[in-house]
Amino acid sequence: MIKDVKFVGPAVGLEFDLKLGDLVRVRYRDTGSYESGYAEETFTGFISKVPVESETEPGWMLCMWCIETASTHILSPKLDIIEVISESR
């Protein structure tokens, strides 16, 4: 049984404390119409790249290795709903 699940995204106020290796489930914003809500399908994977801001790299990107598609997904915490299933140590 999963306890103390954390959500990240617009519906919960953008708590951004994801770490490399966290197991997450993501619901993407519906690409057909951003006004209609979120896609039904969820994707599960591990956080593979976390944002690093520095003078040489001012931008940031959050990536997940998706188990279902065996590919890298770019996550948008301001748009997507990200559910932390298990935190890495």
Image (cartoon, rainbow, N blue to C red):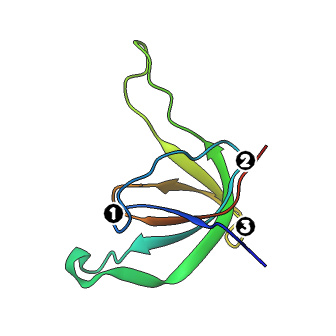
Residue 55 placed where, x, y %?
Answer: 40, 12
Residue drawn at (69%, 52%), measured in percent from left and top? 22
Q: What residue type is labelled 2?
A: Gly
Q: What element carries label 3?
A: loop
**Cα distance, mark 3 to mark 1?**
24 Å
- Give me the C-alpha separation between circle 2 and circle 1: 22 Å
User: Mark on residue 80?
Assistant: none
Name the residue: 41% across, 55% down: 76
Instruction: Please state the horizontal and vertical placement of residue 5, each as a whole percent of the image.
Output: 62, 67
The amino acid beneath tag 3 is Ile
The residue indicated by pointer 3 is 67
Residue 41 higher or lower than 20, as above or below: below
Residue ID for mark 2:
21
Mark 2 falls on what kind of element? loop
Kindly indicate the quadrant of the structure image that contains residue 9.
bottom left
Give 66 or 4, whichever is nearer the viewer. 4
Q: What amino acid is found at the position of numbered circle 1 in the picture?
A: Pro
Of the numbered discs in the image, which one, if any, rests on residue 10? 1
Check the image and report above or below for 26 versus 72.
Answer: below
- Counting residues from the N terminus, which is met first, the one under dot 2 or under dot 1? 1
| Picture layout, residue 43 above or below residue 78 | below
Mark 2 or 1: the one toward you: 1
